[in-house]
Image (spheres, rainbow, N blue to C red):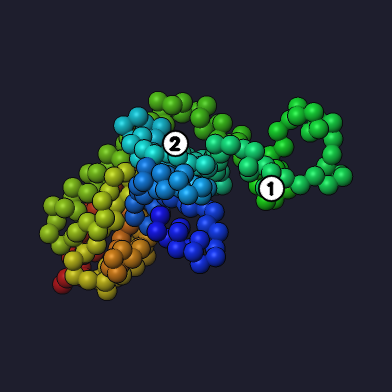
Amino acid sequence: MGAVREDRQGGKIPCFVSATVGTTSSNAIDPLPDIGRICKGEGVWLHVDAAMGGTATLCPEFRYIHKGLEHADSYCFNPHKWMFTNFDCDCFYVADRSALIKTLSILPEYLKNEATASGAVIDYRDWQIPLGRRFRSLKLWFVIRHYGIEGLRYHIREHVKLAQQFVEWVQADERFELVAPAPLNLVCFRHRAGDETNRLILERLNRGGELYLVHTTLNGKYTLRFSVGQTYTEQRHVENAWRRIREVADELST
């Protein structure tokens, strides 16, 4: 709230706030109820980005991450990140589409037609900046048709369970530490020996080809990220990954 008012006092016009449910770097979840109340009170558009984490809410037990979402003016998540859909596919929702359409709509002469004028069709060109769009919804329909809600929930729950098992292994090994909470399927961890050791671990693991990790920096620390979300990932894959991580750590310590 203070930042919004400071901007106004400085002659600026705050108009948009983006909150995140499951950041890419660490799966951090912003406090939507608090942010939402501020945005409502200040008349600022609130967008909620749940790019990967949003898929988890197909399961009732994970819907707590969306607490406060009722305050949002717009929301999106990407099925291509954890819902087994080929890249790219984004699901985008708005509470009141009229504001979006009034902002982005264009109607040159060559686009005028009877169906549009009568309201018989929804022109999705008015929902985005580009005039054209690919037919992304068909591949998402096929995924939903193939798995069904129970199939999707099964895989999501398995991925979270496997990630939580990985968390336990990290916590039980005194050489490693968790760097951030792991509420869903992403685990941020590191070797206690320091940044250079973690860089070497990452390089050797990725060069070996058995698994692939990506790093981030959290609180100034070089951090390894272990994500479970691939369609065919099983317990044995996660076990082998942890075995290989420990082997590389052993190699570096000798």
* Residue 187 horizontal/vertical position (percent): 29, 52
- Residue 171: image location, x then y, percent: 16, 53
Q: Which numbered tag is attached to residue 104? A: 1
Q: Nearer the viewer, residue 208 or 8?
A: 8
Can you say whether 186 is above or below 136 in the image? below
Badge 2 density bin: few <14, some 14–19, many ≥20, Cα 10 Å: few
Q: Tag 1 or tag 2, which sits nearer the N-term? A: 2
Q: Residue at x 51, y 67 (%)?
A: 10
Q: Which residue is mark 2?
A: 70
- Residue appearing at x 27%, y 48% in the figure: 182
Q: Is residue 79 visible?
A: yes
Residue 166 percent location from the top left of the image: 24, 48
> For the residue marked with disc 2, what is the amino acid?
Glu
Q: Which residue is rendered at x = 76% and y = 47% of the image? A: 106
41 relative to 99 in the view: left or right: left
Image disc number at residue 69: none
Q: What residue type is disc 1 on?
A: Leu
Q: Is residue 77 visible?
A: no
Q: Residue at x 24, y 62 (%)?
A: 190
In the image shown, does 51 or 139 lie closer to the viewer? 51
Judge by depth and name the residue closer to the eye, 58 or 173: 58
The quadrant in which the C terminus is found is: bottom left
- Quarter of the rendering occupied by the N terminus: bottom left
Asked whether the residues under the numbered discs 2 and 1 touch, taking CB atoms below 8 Å apart as contact, a structural biologist would say: no
| 100 versus 10 height, above or below | above
Q: From the viewer's perspective, tell me whether residue 227 is left or right of residue 47.
A: left
Q: At numbered mark 2, what does the secondary structure look like: helix, strand or loop?
A: helix
Marks 2 and 1, how far apart in space?
24 Å
The secondary structure type at the circle numbered 1 is helix
Measured from the top left, where is residue 31 in percent x and y? 35, 47
Outermost residue on the right side: it is: 109
Count the numbered circles shown.
Answer: 2
